[in-house]
Structures are given as C-alpha cells and as structure tokens.
Image (spheres, helix red, strand yellow):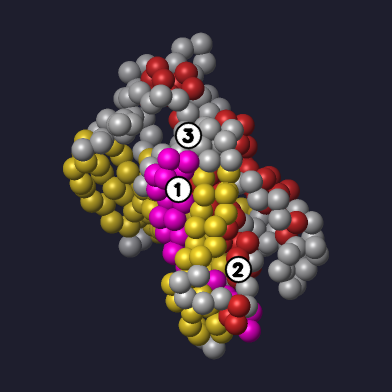
Amino acid sequence: MKASEISVGQTFEKVVVEDLKRTQLVMYSGASGDYNPLHTDDLYCKEAAGYPGVFAHGMLTMGMTGTLVTDLFGAENVRKYGVRFTNQVWPGDTLTATATVQDIRDEDGRPVAEIGIETVNQDGKTVVLGSATGLLED
Amino acid sequence: MSDEKTVTFPVEGTHVMMFARSIGDYNPAYHDPGKGEGNPVGAQVAPPTFPQAVAQFDPEYPLRIKDGEAWFGSGGSPSGIEGKPATSGGLHAEQHFEYTRPVRPGDVLTARYSQGETWEKESRRAGKLTFTERLVDYYDQDGNHVCRARGVGVRTERPVDQG
C-alpha cells in the first residue's frame, strides 16, 4: 500500500470467513498447537465444560482478521497488530473485518499507517476490536 | 520482571504453510518462495500471528496430550479427568504483537516468557473474572529482537452466558 493512495478515514472491508467450518478449527489446532478440546471436542464442550458446542480459538479469529491487515500492508510490513476478543465465534459464523485508516505518519523516516480494526459476525456483533500499524511504500 | 522460561524453536516453511492455511490465508507468500505478493525480497514470510505457534515446541504447554498424563478432553466419557471444574481452561481476552522485523522460515527463535500484571473484575455474563498478562519476547539466532507478544488470559467463575 502506498502512502499516496490512502487517506485518514478510508475503510477497507473483507469477509474473512464464510460459514466457519469445524474442520477449520481442527486445522488451527493442528497448526498452532492449541489443542484445547473447547475448540474441537463437542462432547467435552456440552457435557463437561457447559458450552453449547465447540467455538473458535481467539487466535483463529485474530489470524483470520489479520489476513485483512496483511492484504493491506504485506506480512513483512506489519509493525504492530493487537486485538481484544469481545465475543465468541461459533461454527457457521460469517465474519467481516473492517479496517479504518486512523493516522498516516513518518516513523524513523518511513511512512506508516495506523488502522483500527473491527470484526463483526453475521448478526453485527463485534467479535474482535483492535488496531495495527504497518509500513507504507513511498 | 524475571524470565520464567525460554523455548527455542525453528521456523519451518511447511509449518508456516499449514499455519497460513489454518487461518484461511492462501497468499503465495506463505507457501511459494519468490512469488509472494508485495514481497520485495522474494522469500517466504510468516503470518503476523505465527509466533503463537511456539506452543508446539513448549514442553510444558498444557493444551496438548502428553505421554503418560491424563487428558481433560473426551474419550469414552465427556472428560478424561473426573471432577474437572466446568470451566477448565482460561479464555483469551487480548493479544498484541509488536514486530522489530518479520518472522521468516529459516529463523531459529528463542521465546522468553515473563509474567505481567494480574487483576480481577466482576462480570454479569461469567461471574468473577481473573485476568493474567503474559509477555513473550522472541529473539533470533543472532540474539536480535524479532517480536514481542503480550497476551491477556481470563479465567471465569462460570461458563460465559450465551444470552
């Protein structure tokens, strides 16, 4: 992303997952090493943990949301990325992430952009709220 | 703030590819060296949240089945540990990364863990909440800082009310 191509207040939107599959939760468990049965084991969730079923790792939601951040900046240009998890994400959810350009400035002589990030589910409920900073091309 | 432990692990291209797939990211930068979009140096790079996969290499990581230890997930019965509290694990409340440079396959990273703050809060949806902050600094094989991760975990008094 080039500094000359963006402006404060501009927004970018991406559907980061449509109809989230349980298999995606299994894939994330396997890749990340977080094998908490809350994310893959329906029987455990319902009968031992008191949840209606498996739900997504917070880090999966952060990772899926992060694809918007890396689409914008390129993975090698991300300087900061942080989120708060505000609601759980369930199989079947469709998540839309929105990035809003909040600031464009120079850091150590290079242009950077700070973006606010919000991911909502199909009911408009916020699941992740955060921000990211990335280097821009001159 | 003292270092609690360190874990050293290699960043491998195949692992990065699997991790990228698992977050639904099919950008060739994660599996096809030299063809990454917007990748000026033509090498692979890891997604920003990849450092969290250090869990795979942490010998003490609690959320993985270990040889000879009881596992709290289901087998023939809903949990392999009887009398396990209903809210067994904590939930993740916040996660923040700051990068000194991107993580790339070929790196050998050492994660240094340290404990941050702990605080409590009352919540309508899950009773008393206990928050714990953990910091992980990642250094490369030359001792240079690569990234800092700050995670906040929360233990709930009861399962989060879905209403």
| Chain part drawn in magenta | A114-138
Q: Where is residue A90 in the image (x, y as percent from the top left)?
A: 47, 34
Q: Report the Cα–Cα distance between label 3 and label 2.
A: 28 Å
Residue type at mark 1 is: Val
Residue type at mark 3 is: Trp
Q: Report the Cα–Cα distance between label 2 and label 1.
A: 21 Å
Q: Which residue lies furthest to the top in this view?
A: B76
Residue type at mark 2 is: Phe
Q: Do labels 2 and 1 share a chain?
A: yes
Q: In which quarter of the image is residue B80?
A: top left
Q: Position of residue B89 (x, y in %)?
A: 38, 34
Residue B125 visible to an observer of this rendering: yes
* Subunit bearing disc 1: A
**What type of secondary structure mainly makes up the magenta span?**
strand
Q: Quadrant of the C terminus of chain B?
A: top left
* Subunit bearing disc 2: A
Q: Quadrant of the N terminus of chain B?
A: bottom left
**Which residue carries the number 2 mark?**
A73
Q: Where is residue A91 in the image (x, y as percent from the top left)?
A: 52, 32
**Which residue carries the number 3 mark?**
A90
Along the horizontal axis of the image, is B118 left or right of B57?
Answer: left
Q: What element carries label 1?
A: strand
Q: In which quarter of the image is residue A47?
A: top left
State which tag comes first along the sequence, 2 or 1.
2
Q: Position of residue A136 (x, y in %)?
A: 59, 77
Viewer-nearest of labels 1 and 3? 1
- Contact between marks 1 and 3 (CB within 8 A): the answer is no
Using the image as rendered, state which of residue B46 and residue B138 is in the foreground.
Answer: B46
Along the horizontal axis of the image, is B48 left or right of A44?
Answer: right
